[in-house]
Image (cartoon, rainbow, N blue to C red):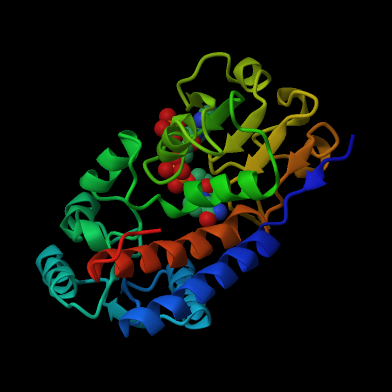
Amino acid sequence: MTAQLIDGKAIAAKTRLRVAAETAEFIAATGVVPQLATVLVGEDPASAVYVRNKHVACEKVGFRNQQHTLPATTSQAELLELVSRLNGDPAVHGILVQLPLPEQIDEQVILDSVHPLKDVDAFHPENVGLIVQGRPRFLPCTPAGVQVLLRESGVEVDGAHVVVIGRSEIVGKPMGMILVQKGETANATVTICHSRTRHLPSIVRTADIIVAAIGRPNFVTADMVKLGAVVIDVGINRVGDRLVGDVDFDDVREVASAITPVPGGVGPMTIAMLMQNTLTAARLQTGGAAK
Ligand SMILES: NC(=O)c1ccc[n+]([C@@H]2O[C@H](COP(=O)([O-])OP(=O)(O)OC[C@H]3O[C@@H](n4cnc5c(N)ncnc54)[C@H](OP(=O)(O)O)[C@@H]3O)[C@@H](O)[C@H]2O)c1
């Protein structure tokens, strides 16, 4: 068996086109142009690339955007002051603080300070609580993107056993929470594994769908994958001058029924879902219900 490739680039492009069309309708109906503000502290080159890509995506779907670049020496109070200013600016609908932040700044304090209606990353406790209760306002971009990939690829999630490897607040935990909910492309039986999980390979072997979000190249090997399982690789690891995922792609694709490549799988979806969330934020702040 050679797995079907799940084409994240194509599905992300389709998602962005839909968001662009809905944005044009929204602007025509309200006169309001959705705007995303990004905040980058310091000079981490990878973060700078991520932020640039987000601005390019904003322009493509018809959003305004503004970028705030602060020096690595910025204090927590100074950053809180900027977030507070953006919270109070009615022309800004979404605020994205690029992580990681320099060590003198407590990330949680900053993420908690973003207004919940502008929290397009869905990190604020109020938004996390709404996800847990099954009535999300925003879904975190990467796990939401995985759910769209599964839906668009026709993967049967209802009743499936999903094993998520990784329990971060950004990917693993919300991934499990999204797929266990009642609803479309959900209703899964979810197991979340992490570095303290006993007998991890044998648990992963029982999965109908594997979501790997570990940050270690080649962690998921073919002997851990049930014949016909669907494998979603969230990992992005730099090995020499190549980007690779967490899955031993060449061997696993001979066992799986469908698999995402790295790059070109989950990565493009993350930014597409950020666009979706920014439009949702603009709708919520102009009194329209989120679609
Ligand atoms: N495609 C995208 O857009 C996108 C977005 C976000 C992240 N990523 C990538 O996804 C990967 C994960 O990101 P993250 O932010 O979730 O990373 P993270 O915060 O470092 O979390 C990694 C998780 O993997 C678990 N883990 C580490 N070693 C393990 C082992 N030997 N066995 C089992 N579990 C192990 C950790 O367990 P403990 O909790 O026990 O330590 C932790 O829960 C990274 O490669 C990142 O670059 C991609």
- What residue occupies the far right of the structure in this picture? 1
Q: Please tell me which residue lies in front, 134 or 177.
A: 134
Q: Please tell me which residue lies in front, 255 or 195.
A: 255
Which residue is drawn at the image coordinates 40% and 46% (left, top)? Answer: 170
Residue 51 point in image, percent of width and height? 43, 72
Relative horizontal placement of residue 56, taking residue 245 as reference (left or right): left
Residue 139 point in image, percent of width and height? 40, 50
Q: Please tell me which residue lies in front, 145 or 25.
A: 25
Which residue is drawn at the image coordinates 66% and 54% (left, top)? Answer: 265
Quadrant in the picture for residue 286: bottom left
* Image quarter of the N terminus: top right
Relative horizontal placement of residue 51, taking residue 234 as reference (left or right): left
* Image quarter of the C terminus: bottom left
Which residue is drawn at the image coordinates 48% and 60% (left, top)? Answer: 273
Residue 140 point in image, percent of width and height? 40, 50
Depicted 228 relative to depicted 70: above or below: above
The number of callouts visible is: 0
Does residue 182 appear anywhere in the picture?
yes
Relative horizontal placement of residue 267, taking residue 240 as reference (left or right): left
Q: Please tell me which residue lies in front, 257 or 216.
A: 257
Which residue is drawn at the image coordinates 51% and 25% (left, top)? Answer: 190
